Structure formats: structure tokens, C-alpha cells
Amino acid sequence: MDQISSFRYAKGPVKVSVQKVIEYPLHWDDCIEIVMVLEGSILLERDFDFFYFFIPQIMKENDIFAVSINETHRIHSSYDNVVLIIQIDGDFIRQNFADVTILEFASLLTPKNDLEKEKIEYLKQLTMYLASLVTDPQKEQRTEIEKTAKVLLYTLIYNFNMINRALDSCKSDIKYQRFLRSNKYLIENIHRKKLLQEIAEREHLNPASISHEIKRYFVYSFQEHINDYRIRKALKMLLSTDKNICDIAYECGFSAPRYFHKSFNQRFSQSPVDFRKKHQKDYQNINYLICYEEVENADNYIKSNHNKLTGKDIEWLKIDANSHGPSFTLNGENHLNILKSKDLLNPQTQNYLRTIQKEFAFQNIKLYDLFNDEIQMANSDFSGYNWNNVNSILRFIIQLGYKPIISLRPTPLNIETYKKLISQYLRRNERKLGNKIIKNLAFEIDRNCDSANELIKIISEYTKNIFDNENIDSIYPPNSLSKTIYMATYLIKEALQNHNIDFLQIIDHSIDEDSNNKFSGLFTENGLLKPSFHACSLLALLGNELIEKGDYYIVTKKEDSLQILLYNHLELSNDINEDDFYNNYLDNKDNVKKINIFIKNINQIYKVIRYELNNENGSVYYHLRQMRNYNFLNNYDIKLLNNKISTPKVKIDYIEGDTTFNINLQPYSTELITLDLIKS
């Protein structure tokens, strides 16, 4: 039964209060209590830790902590403060979660790593959101309140339960479940004298094995573990009853009062009698001794703090790891362009294409200028044509697994010469390349060409793969920004919206100076990887099953793996130049996208890999701009930039149990999160 009656707001299973706290004496409640310091500081004392019973912890502004069901604690302060207190009813918790009798929450002040820090931030945002729902005077919102309370409890229980943290290194689910059963039996039978033997018999193990496991995962011995729970029970009895010390000792399972005195003295540096004299009266009169001031207009106060903590437009993404969806592929019409086919005679360009082939799933290569004097088609005496270079290019592309598309637009030669050239090539090379290869060649025709129909007639004798792209609406990025990180999010947005991204090429080239795709290469001319390359790398990691897609994200699945791709793209007009982009758009804090991701039904161990692609991590042009002069780059410098300096930031972690990610996505940034099941 709750001891405290200081809550102004209550809806469904949740109570909320915003207060200036002075004193809450030692007490415990049948609820989970979440306390967040909004201003100033307070002191918290709690019995949750074996080594630090009731040692005050200083909680400062923006700190948060959670108190488990029936955990003895005290809150007090002699300083100005504003504190948000939320209580979630114990019956509601027991209806929705199993084994809540053994909940003990870890401190939320010292996250172990970046992932846990994000989970704490997510917990704060959930807390503020739940408080805003309960204090909203206009709406009842009971369904949303219960739903949010469940998500908050889920986040707490599966990420910050001390039992889970202690057993992090235990990879055996059998051992994990055995400990939960044993601990529950221990708590429910704390008064019994031979608990170790009884638990060992129940688990069909010898007592030494049980004791060894406790020592291994929890540092202290089985006997210390039992005494810890016995002291907690005794403490409550000292405060809430008038039973004599001997009766309390025996009822809590101590074999003799002297052992109870010894254990109690070790924890509190005082005897049970002195502890009772000091605290019992305060507990019995707690509703008279609680000292606080209710903050006026708490709903407005919570709303403003909620906005300050989360931003006005926080996005909530909830994913079920067990979900399934329809099959998913990126737009099949996408292809890679080779604007100067002669480049593929260069071993370096061939290496670029091999690199692309390893990373991405492009199916087609569109070749421009294949039938061109630069390919050295004419014999030295101009008596005929030498097709060796053309065939070398086509064989190389086919060997890599691509389908070549030969673009015949614009026509570079006299149209009559061009018709004769195409006809001769197809007729004479059908045997050299093979009938099957010639039949599978595809040709793109310029419909504006006067002799388009005649060209189609010639080609159709050998292959039916003839098309034009006059109806394809290709949207090109601004040329002035194609070298920048803008290109990465632009490319991802277009691909996920099923638009054609048929402007990409291997290296920066243009058909003419006014061409829209002048800087649309995946490599610069000297071999530096561009943001578009890294964007395609992330797209290639997506799964083949679509779980969910929105304006700024996509969630896919492949067998037991999950992929979450997030991007923050803002459209800019063609007249924006590089300096405008870097000075006025890239670091605009108003355009930061805040995203909270909650993933449930993570029932096994998963490896989490996070790829962050942004201006500093993946934009080579950003790093070139930092240099005084980058005209002297050598091969070593290029390798260093491509492999060490200008690459997406990658982080690896392992998770078990439902998890959360709290993400601040800067403008023109992308993040891919992959979760891969560990099968052994």
C-alpha cells in the first residue's frame, strides 16, 4: 500500500507530481517510482546495493533514477530544486511483467558505454512524454498512457535490471533461468534455515555449484547474498512493526539474534535498536513529515522541459523484431553509367569497377561513346574496323556479372556512317562474342535521331533489347553540391522513393560542360571515394523483406537480421553553391532530426553494427577543403583518405533483450543500424 499521498495528477495506473522536495523519510511503495531532477539537486538514499546501503547519492539537474517495487529509500534536499516523480502501480506491473519480485535497478548516473547512454536518454524522453500525457488537462488518453507506461517499464526492466547486468557475461540461458528461479525461491522463503541445500535439490545440483555461480556473477558469496535480503526484510519490520529484535531475527531467517546484530551493524554501523529509535517514528508519521512544495502549472512546466529535452519534433519508431513483410528490392531500372567507354581500357578504372561490383548490386552498365574514334576502332589503313577494344570492354563487363547497355545517343558520327558501323559490328562479331552474348546486348536509341527507325531495324535483326528513356523522369542533384555530403542523402532518398538514380557513373565525367551529371561519379578522377559511393554501400546492406518505410527511414529484414536506415535530407535549389551549403545549411541546429527507436522481441544475442555517414565521416571533399592545397596528393595519401580518414564511422556492440536507440541525426547525415543474430 502506498505511503505517500502527495500526487496531484493520476490517470490509470500512473501518478505524477512536480515538486520542490525537502524531505521524504525512509519509505517503500508497491510501485515502480521514477524520479527526474528538473532543476537543482537532491540526495537519494536506497537499499538496492549490497555494499552501499543508504549512502547518499547526489542527483543533479537532468539526472534520473528508478526505485523498484517495495524498495526502501529516502529523498531529501536542503537546496532549491524541482523534481518530477512518477509512480506506476504495482498491480499494473504484475499484470504485464513476470517475476517483478526480483527487480533491482542499476544506477542510471554512470552509463557503461555509448549504447547505454543512449538508452538512458531514451528513458528520460519516455518519462517526460508519460508525464505530459498524465498532466494534460484536456485529454484522458488512458490507452496511450498505459501503452507508454509499458514501453517505459520494458526499457527499464530489460536494460537496467541489476540481475540482467550481473548476468551479462552468462551466455547460457539455462543458467540465467536457473538463477531467476533460485532467487525468486530465496526471496519467498527467506525465513528458512537451509536455503542453499533446498535450492540445490530443486535444481538437481550440488550446493557447491550453486554457491560458485553466485560468487562468479555477483562477487559476494551465497551466504552474503541471503543476508542481504534478510537485512532488507528486517529493516522494513523494524520500521513498520513493534516486534522485538529476537523475533525479527528468527522471522527473517537468522539462526540467532547475535548474527542478526552482527550483519546489521556491518551494513549500517549501528545496532537494530538504534536504527529503530532513529527512523521508526518518522516512518509511522510519514504523511505528516513529508515536506515539499507543489509546483504550480505543472503541465506547462513538463511541456516546456519535454521540448527542451527532446526537441519539438521527436520521432518515435517502434519495431517488432518478429515482424515480417513483403519482398523488397531497390528500383531495378537503376544502372551505372560509363560516359567515356575508353576508360574501361584503363586498369585503374577496371579496379574501380571491381570495387563497385563487390560493394553494390548494380545489374546494368550503360556505355556511352562505345563506337567512337577514341576506342581506336579504325584499322591503321582505314580499310575497315578493328573491334578488339570494343569487345574487350564488353567481355570485361559481362565477366563481372553486369548486363551491358550500349547507348547510341547522342550519335557522335555522320548518321549514314553510324548505321553502317553498327550493322557491320553486329554482323561480324556475332561469331566472335557468341550469338548468346549478342542477343543479350541492350541498346538505347535516341528517338530524336532522324534515322532512329532505321537503326532499330538494323539492331532488331540481332537483339530485341531496344529501348529509349525519353519517358524516364531522372532527377539530377545540383551540380554544385554533387561533391558534398548532400549527394549521399539525396541518393538514398531517391532510391528509397523508387525514383531512377540512373545518373551515377564510375568517375566524374560529363558529355558536355552543361551536363547535369558532371560530378555524379562514385570516384573522383584521381580515385577518391565520394559520399555517393558510401551511400550506395549502405543501400546495398538492406535486406530483401520490407518491414516498414517512412519519410526518413526504412526497416528491412533478411532471415534473422534486421536493418534500419535513417537519413536527414533537405532539398536545396540548383543555385545554392558550396559555400552557402557549408555556411548556412549543413550545421543548422533547427534541422536536427531526433529519433527514438524501440525494438522489442530481441530474445537472443545480436551483434549491432552502426554506420554513421556524415560530413566528417564519409565526405572526402570536406577533408580536402580543410587542406591548404590538395593538388599534390599521391597514391599513399589517396589510400589514407579512402581507408582511414574519409570513411563512415562504424561501432560494434552486442545486445540481448529489447533495446532502444536514441539518435540525433544532423542535416544531411545518414545512419544504418544492423542487428545480426549470433547463432552459436
Image (cartoon, rainbow, N blue to C red):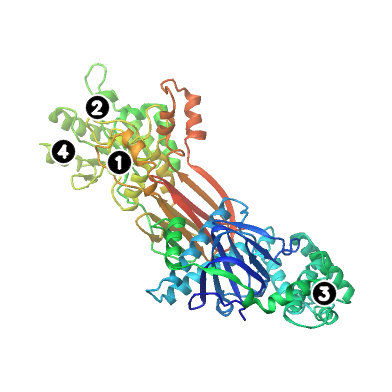
Dot 4, crowdedness within 10 Å: few (<14), some or many (≥20)? many
- Mark earlier in primary sequence (4, 1): 1
Q: Quadrant of the N terminus?
A: bottom right
Task: Give the label on residue 380, or none.
Answer: none
Q: Which residue is mark 1?
A: 435
* Distance from the alpha carbon under mark 4 to that under mark 3: 105 Å
Residue 392: percent from left, percent from top: 35, 30
* Distance from the alpha carbon under mark 1 to that under mark 3: 100 Å
Tell me, yes or no, whether the two marked residues, 4 and 1, touch with CB atoms within 8 Å: no
Amino acid type, residue under disc 1 in the picture:
Asn
Tell us which disc is closer to us: 4 or 2. Answer: 2
Q: Which residue is mark 3?
A: 273
Amino acid type, residue under disc 4 in the picture:
Leu
Amino acid type, residue under disc 2 in the picture:
Asn
- Mark earlier in primary sequence (3, 2): 3
Amino acid type, residue under disc 3 in the picture:
Val
- Mark earlier in primary sequence (4, 3): 3
Residue 210: percent from left, percent from top: 79, 68
Would you place residue 570 above or below residue 605 in this image?
above
* Distance from the alpha carbon under mark 2 to that under mark 1: 23 Å
Q: Which residue is mark 2?
A: 372
Tell me, yes or no, whether the two marked residues, 4 and 3, touch with CB atoms within 8 Å: no
Count of numbered badges drawn on the protein: 4
